[in-house]
Image (cartoon, grey):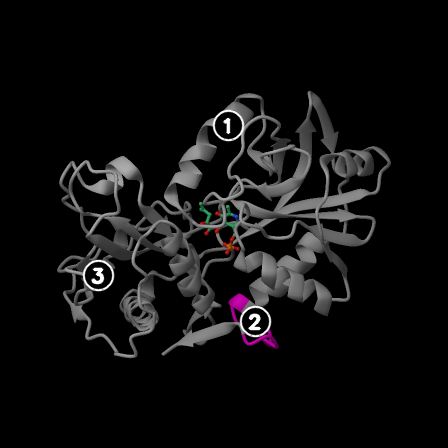
């Protein structure tokens, strides 16, 4: 929905900034929150005046539908700062569109494009000093919307809150990860909400992931829910596999999130002359490739982690190690995408947006 009305954002600035308490050289991921947040309420059938207020707790009625029926969707994006102090975003309209695709699936009203973009840009200009410039860090941005209407009736809420909160963040994962190919649990199913960034999708992943962690793995590789034969996603990331010199990623579907990093990497790989195949791949093909030495690399791709190389995987009580290579597709693609994001290179795709 685009209302084509530039929203007048009411701004209340904090009286006491927390910025001096932050160690910008030692940032965890998503733990420290900036001074302000963007908030807009949906009431009486429409979005109300958007506001930027000091970051603060919320007060909600215990019968709010978010607590009972999980009506909540979110986005993950990042802001970067270049050497000339410009604030940069990466394909922000894709996130704006996707939060509304997610919202629609959960019967949440769509949030207007101009409210989203104006709110985001105004908030970033206010929080400019919070955008870290240390290597590998950025300002992680979390837009989200959830049901605030009251009552135990299992039906969509009549009131919602849209918020954008920001966190100066370092790397999501420390290094290479070991993953377990899931054979019992599923993160999504046909006709379900797998393609949406619904909060409940992540809650459903925590228990199987914990079981994998207890066995010594860091993440789960999700397979399709009916046969568990096809590789679908890597934790909260899309997955790429390199067999010989061909890079393979699963096609998106109603079970898989249409990742912005994934689709950008497909374009960059083509531009690099890498042979890329978007096709279904079975666990058998992967284990055979690991056994005959043709499986060269696997990595997860997503906004938070960018590219997360996989060191090895477990499947049916057997562990498969991946080779340690000098020049990897993962490193090449990571350099290309982060050079665009941080304005260290030309952006022939037109993905970078300067916040003015
Ligand atoms: N898959 C899932 C389930 C995710 O949660 C994410 C993270 O957003 C991704 C893939 C990667 O998507 P993107 O690259 O748009 O961040
Ligand atoms: C992201 O990559 O931005 C995500 O939203 C994944 C996440 C659950 C941290």
Q: Is mark 3 within 8 Å of ligand 2?
A: no
Q: Which residue is mark 3?
A: 40
Question: What residue range appears in magenta?
Answer: 341-350
* Residue 344 - label: 2
Query: Does 95 appear above or below 320?
Result: below
8 horizontally vs 185: left or right: left
Q: Nearer the viewer, mark 2 or mark 1?
A: 1
Residue 146 visible to the viewer = yes
Q: CA distance from mark 3 to mark 2?
A: 35 Å
Q: Label 2, label 1: how many angstroms apart (C-alpha)?
A: 39 Å
Does the residue tagged 2 have its C-beta within 8 Å of any atom of ligand 1? no
Q: Residue at x 53, y 21 (%)?
A: 214
Whole-Å distance between the Cαs marked 1 and 3? 35 Å
Q: 287 or 100, which lies in front?
A: 100
Describe residue 38's horizontal placement relative to residue 246 as left or right: left
Q: Where residue 300 sits in the image (x, y, percent)?
A: 60, 47
Residue 231, x across and y down, in percent: 66, 40
Q: Residues within 10 Å of mark 2 (few under 14, many from 20)?
A: some
Mark 3 or 2: the one toward you: 3
Chain-order first, disc 2 or disc 1: 1
Question: Would you place residue 356 above or below residue 57 in this image?
Answer: below
The answer to whether the residue labelled 2 contacts the one labelled 1, judged by CB atoms less than 8 Å apart, is: no
Q: Tell me the chief SS of the magenta region.
A: loop
Residue 106, how many percent across, how many down?
A: 36, 49
- Is 346 one of the magenta-colored residues? yes
Q: Residue at x 44, y 69 (%)?
A: 93
Using the image as rendered, state which of residue 115 and residue 227 is in the foreground: 227
User: Pointer 1: what residue?
Assistant: 208
User: Ligand 1 within 8 A of label 1's CB?
Assistant: no
């Amino acid at each position: 929905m685009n209302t084509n009305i530039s929203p007048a954002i009411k701004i209340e600035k904090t009286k006491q900034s927390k910025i001096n308490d932050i160690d910008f050289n030692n940032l965890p991921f998503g733990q420290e929150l900036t001074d302000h947040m963007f908030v807009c309420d949906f009431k009486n059938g429409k979005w109300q005046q958007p506001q930027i207020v000091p970051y603060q707790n919320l007060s909600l009625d215990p019968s709010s539908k978010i607590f009972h029926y999980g009506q909540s969707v979110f986005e993950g994006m990042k802001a970067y700062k270049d050497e000339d102090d410009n604030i940069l975003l990466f394909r922000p309209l894709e996130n704006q569109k996707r939060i509304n695709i997610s919202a629609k699936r959960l019967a949440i009203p769509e949030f207007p494009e101009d409210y989203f973009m104006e709110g985001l840009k105004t908030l970033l200009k206010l929080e400019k000093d919070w955008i870290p410039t240390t290597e590998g860090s950025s300002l992680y941005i979390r837009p989200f919307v959830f049901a605030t209407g009251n009552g135990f009736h299992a039906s969509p809420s009549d009131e919602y809150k849209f918020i954008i909160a920001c966190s100066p963040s370092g790397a999501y994962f420390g290094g290479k990860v070991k993953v377990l190919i899931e054979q019992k649990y599923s993160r999504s199913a046909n006709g379900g909400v797998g393609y949406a960034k619904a909060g409940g999708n992540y809650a459903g992943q925590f228990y199987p992931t914990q079981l994998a962690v207890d066995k010594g793995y860091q993440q789960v590789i999700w397979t399709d829910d009916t046969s568990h034969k096809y590789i679908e996603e890597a934790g909260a990331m899309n997955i790429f596999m390199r067999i010989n010199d061909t890079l393979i990623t699963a096609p998106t579907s109603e079970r898989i999130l249409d990742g912005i990093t994934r689709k950008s990497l497909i374009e960059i790989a083509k531009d690099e002359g890498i042979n890329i195949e978007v096709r279904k791949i079975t666990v058998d093909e992967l284990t055979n490739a690991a056994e005959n030495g043709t499986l060269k690399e696997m990595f997860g791709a997503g906004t938070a982690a960018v590219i997360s190389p996989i060191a090895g995987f477990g499947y049916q009580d057997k562990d498969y190690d991946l080779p340690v290579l000098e020049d990897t597709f993962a490193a090449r693609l990571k350099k290309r995408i982060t050079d665009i994001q941080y304005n260290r290179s030309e952006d022939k795709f037109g993905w970078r947006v300067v916040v003015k």
